[in-house]
Image (spheres, helix red, strand yellow):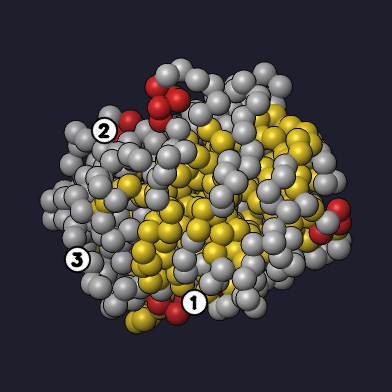
Amino acid sequence: RAYGEPHRPRFHFTPPAQWMNDPNGMFYLNGEYHLSYQYYPDSTVWGPMHWGHAVSKDLVRWEHLPIALYPDSLGYIFSGSAVVDHDNTSGLAAGDTPVVVAAFTHHDPVGEQAGANDFQKQSLAFSPDGGRTWTKYAGNPVLANETGIRDFRDPKLIWHEPTGKWIMALAVYDRVQFYASPDLKQWTYLSEFGIPGDTRLWECPDLFPLLDPETGETRWVLLVSIQQDAPNGGTATSYFIGDFDGTRFLADPDRQQWLDWGTDNYAFVTWDNAPVSPDRRIGIGWMSNWQYAQQVPTEAWRSAMTVPRVLSLRREGEGYFLASAPIGALESLRAEETRLGRRVIIGEQEIQGSFSPDRCELLLQTDLERTTASLFGITLTNPGGDRLIIGLDRENGQVWVDRRNSGPKGFSDAFFVGPHSAPLDFGEATMDLRLLLDVASLELFAGEGKLNFTEVFFPSSPFQTLTVWAQDGEWVLSDGRVYSLGGIWE
Ligand code: FRU
């Protein structure tokens, strides 16, 4: 399948056609990574939700599978997760293949219309054949809503080894509630976690342990997507690092941090059962923002996922942050290499080589001792006069992305606000920057992975020139490389 429509990413996951939002039900089994997603097969805007479905052996190249879950008499199929039930605690296994159990929210639009406050409930589906076919559990829902709070959704399951039970993290309006179960069917309320006085809407939680290889200590990470007032507007994924004792989550004093500072990484959640060491966790986010997701100018389909990313803990002073990096297998897409080597940039310089600026990977190492420019960056342009600018403002310790003139306006006002910025600790000796460009998106990684910046854009024609520039001095690269990247459907 060689997707050729304007703005169609070449190495990011997109649905074949129609509307997609959150990643759902992710697990690894028998050499395959499964990815389901919020899907409406009848339109390019949000509607009655299904779970679309795809599978990959390397998290890079995907194969589309038939829709996994359809709406039913209990409602639409909202976001949720899946786990491999190795010990058949659920009793739902048949044969030798471990049963995969998905938990999702049944959203009843009729109840919602009628003004009920319990129209969101948690239900199960299971797969006896490693995730190929799915059956809804006959006893649905397994968790009714007795809280009186309307927003009660997005169950994320995890096996809690120390206490030998399943834990469900659930977004309940402005907090996360935790429930426990021996068999995934019967759930008992444990506790809740929120920020006193903060009443923003929380969605799509995730809870998992990560080992700090340096101290041997395990910390717990709670991801939560926030529906409003993200650092650069609209919706974004945040996280807390702390402790989870099987009942309660206790956050470290540094509190809430942003997983990604750009506008387009929402509902980021992680894979169950992935074959990685305990100091790593692999996840993926929806590369859009509810502020304009339904208006962006694509025709056949709407929205893409981020590249899958590896999360790990990094110490900083007394606390921790989460470092993100693109998964290693992405390097298998690298084709021609253009070497920039050691290079001094004064004013503007076009970078040419065997790559197409709209679809490439840049690796730039800045020599901070020799760099005298206070501001330097990268600009993409096309013959139509669209431009996208990435600025590295050393003086103010910031990185910014300006997409205000990145393409035809009019589809959304919120989209063209900016520039968008994030704090960046430049360090002292060298600063490594990695940039992934894929037709309609950029993903920037810097500062040992502490800084991730993900943004989408829609130029009138593909970006054709890539220039690097420095203001008031020299930008000295100690090394630089550009790779052309192959597509994942080719
Ligand atoms: C997050 C979200 C979830 C919900 C789903 C519905 O983007 O609003 O809370 O389950 O999308 O599609």
Residue under the image location 58 percent in, 32 percent down: 152
Nearest to N terminus: mark 1 or mark 2: 1
Instruction: Say what secondary structure mark 3 lies in.
Output: loop
Read off the residue under disc 3: 4
- Would you call the spot at circle 1 few (<14 residues within 10 Å), some (14-19), or many (20 or more)? some
Image quadrant in which you'd find residue 281:
bottom right
- Give the class, few, some or many, for how many residues have Cα within 10 Å of label 2's Cα (few <14, many ≥20): some
What amino acid is labelled 1 in the image? Lys
Residue 230, image x, y percentages: 50, 33
Question: Which residue is at a point 46% across and 72% down the rendered structure image?
Answer: 56
* Relative image position of residue 48 (x, y in whole percent): 35, 40
Q: Say which quadrant the C terminus sits in.
A: bottom left
Towards the viewer: 72 or 276: 72
Residue annotated with mark 1 = 57
Q: Nearer the viewer, mark 3 or mark 1?
A: 1
Please provide percent x and percent y for residue 451.
Answer: 56, 51
* 3D distance between C-alphas at marks 2 and 3: 24 Å
